[in-house]
Image: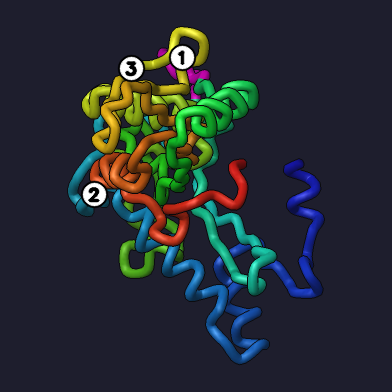
Amino acid sequence: MNKRYHKRTHKFGMRVPKTVQEAIDIDRENGDTLWQDAIKKEMDAVMIAFRILNDDEAIPPGYQEINCHLVFEIKLESFRRKARYVAGGHMTDAPATLTYASVVSRESVRIALTLAALNDLEVKAGDIENAYLTAPAAERISIVCGPEFGPNAGKRALVVRSLYGLKSSGAAFRNHLADCMGTLGYKPCLADQDVWLKPMVRPSDGHHYYAYVLLYVDDALVIHHDGMSALKEIDHFFKMKPSSMGDPDLYL
């Protein structure tokens, strides 16, 4: 996959950059700022993951220095340019904690949709925005800021949130989200720990049932008599993309 990415130069007939400078060059040739806008949007979102060190600050003991880079993509919908800042997780030592992160199974999704139909419940879906960045970093990582950091280029920074690409990021986010679900009163199903359930009573007729939240990394599917209210409870702790909240046309 790595070789395939580096070999690809165009997508949908449009040139895809590999570096920040190449993205600037493409924008200059095309007379627009589409790639630069994508870089700015990504870096504005990802800056929360770093603590920029002052010039006189030393990196604390136990931190590993790694490289990070931007991955560029063109999305099918309206050929939107997208940049994703990722860590070179292959450069880090194996974390001391487990890095496995489970996801909800297809069978659980089918059963939940059947239960929704049998109990006349709403089905709503939502997608958590910049999911991994909501979780604290489980590894001690430092970087040297690249040109995408603007005036902070060349400075050293500590990674304080789970960046895409780190070995522990998936597990860190999954555990962080699990703590939130417990706070909201949900418990994991014994058969599938990514199906979260909570006893509920439907106000309209006093019907007792279980509300469900199914989690596949950052994609949430809610089975509830008032699905939007359940989604907004999660949205209070984990910001969701507004356009993703509502009736699902498809799930995964």
Out of 31 and 207, give the one closest to the viewer.
207
Task: Tell me which label, 1 or 3, sits earlier in the chain.
Answer: 1
Q: Is residue 176 left or right of residue 236?
A: right
For label 2, the residue is 53
Q: Are marks 1 and 2 in contact (CB under 8 Å)?
A: no
Using the rendered view, name the quadrant where residue 97 is placed: top left
Query: Which x, y percent locates residue 118?
Result: 52, 28
> In which quadrant will I find the N terminus?
top right
| Type of the residue with mark 2 | Leu
Above or below, 27 against 62 in this view is below
Residue shown at the point (74%, 72%) measured from the top left: 15
Query: Which x, y percent locates residue 202?
Result: 29, 32
For label 1, the residue is 98
Q: Is residue 147 left or right of residue 209?
A: right
Label 1: element kind: loop
Q: Give the CA distance from mark 3 to mark 2.
A: 40 Å
| Highlighted magenta segment, given as a residue range | 93-100
Q: Are marks 1 and 3 in contact (CB under 8 Å)?
A: no
**Badge number at residue 187:** 3
